[in-house]
Image (cartoon, helix red, strand yellow):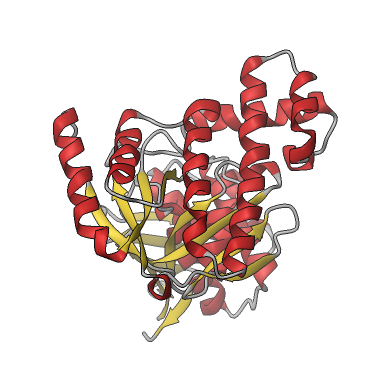
Amino acid sequence: MTVWRAPGRINLVGEHTDYNDGFVLPFALEVGCTAAVAPGPAGSDGWSVRSAQQPEPVVVRRSGLAAAPDVPEWSRYVLGALWLLTDRGVEVPALDLEVDSDVPSGAGLSSSAALVCSVARAVDDHLGLDLDDAALFALTRDVENDAVGAPTGGMDQLVSLRGRAGHALFCDMRSHETRAVPLDLAGSGLAVLVADTRAPHQHSDGEYGNRRSGCEEAARRLGVPALRDVAAADLDHALARLDDDELRRYVRHVVTEDDRVLSVVRLLDEGRLPEIGPLLTASHVSMRDDFRITVPEVDTAVNALHGAGALGARMTGGGFGGCVIGLVPESAVEPAGEAVRAAFADAGFGEPSLFTATPAAGAHPIAG
């Protein structure tokens, strides 16, 4: 049996910039997904998939993606790697796969990438394929895009595969080059407090895809390969060339968000971590007012964190629900959490889940 674990992630800053060939700054979490791969039973000619979070196993015949049967969505994240490897000429034998995740589903912490990356690494190791970093990244991104139909840009897979403890991962989403950036929270007397609002978050719904297609249309009208190619200094000129208010808002968010990522990276490189707080807050305002992907629960959590002394706070993830992060002094973690709970109670929302997050390692093998 071959066992690998891959983490979920928090995106410190850089939302909806990944599919615009821009910049992102996520870090891997301690929560993640464990995938175990073993040979199928003698005489088997199929793939069997089990999940600790799902009551029924899924058993299918071996095939490529075009011949893939209709199966529950969660199992497509597991079987997708097998289908795509088959399409790419790899002889994938009968296998039994078991997965177990402790990443909260629907929270915007990339439970899907943790699932896909743990399976891909375990299958690669089990079959002795020796896929390099680029090939593994391409496979995991294609599973979400092609096998599942979620139009994600690849950030989640990069950090799940390449994350480093104690660091954020600066990702150039055009070249897919990455660099570890120090994120010494304890050394600065700070913590990242995460508030899972429990407002459902789902990438494969229409709103995420609408934002992506809108950004692509704006780039086409501006005559650039992607919105990453609009410099911050040229933003006003670019906006003046667009006659669609919605597209102008999308462009303004993406261009300013890329600039915020670069500014945060510079500050972290210089050891000025507390100074990133206002940039995190500005990111949230842009997501709320320009990209319009926040919901009342996340706005309430952000406001409560600010009122409790957070240096900065923002929604993290693709939007329309999920988690909020606050950069808070270590001494303020408990009162800040209580402020969020109280604000939710006053607003009639359900109980949020609160925890602190520290940067963890990317995908790694587990002794079987």
Residue displayed at 54% across by 40% down: 149
Q: Is residue 279 visible?
A: yes
In the rendered image, the residue lying farthest to the bottom is: 367
Judging depth in this view, the residue of 156 and 27 nearest the camera is 27
Q: Is residue 141 left or right of residue 113?
A: right
Q: Is residue 39 above or below residue 157?
A: below
Q: Is residue 34 above or below residue 351?
A: below
Q: Residue 44: x, y in percent?
A: 42, 67
Q: Is residue 38 left or right of residue 131?
A: left
User: Image quadrant of residue 6?
Assistant: bottom left
- What number of labels is visible? 0
Judging depth in this view, the residue of 2 and 116 nearest the camera is 116
Q: Quick one: quadrant of the N terminus?
A: bottom left
Q: Residue 86: x, y in percent?
A: 62, 60
Q: Is residue 78 left or right of residue 125?
A: left
Q: Residue 272: x, y in percent?
A: 54, 65
Q: Is residue 79 above or below residue 28?
A: above
Q: Quick one: quadrant of the C terminus?
A: bottom left
User: Image quadrant of residue 67?
Assistant: top right
User: Image quadrant of residue 365?
Assistant: bottom left
Q: Residue 296: x, y in percent?
A: 32, 29
Residue displayed at 66% across by 46% down: 259
In the rendered image, the residue lying farthest to the top is: 243
Q: Is residue 63 visible?
A: no
Q: Is residue 136 left or right of residue 235?
A: left
Q: Is residue 18 above or below residue 95?
A: above
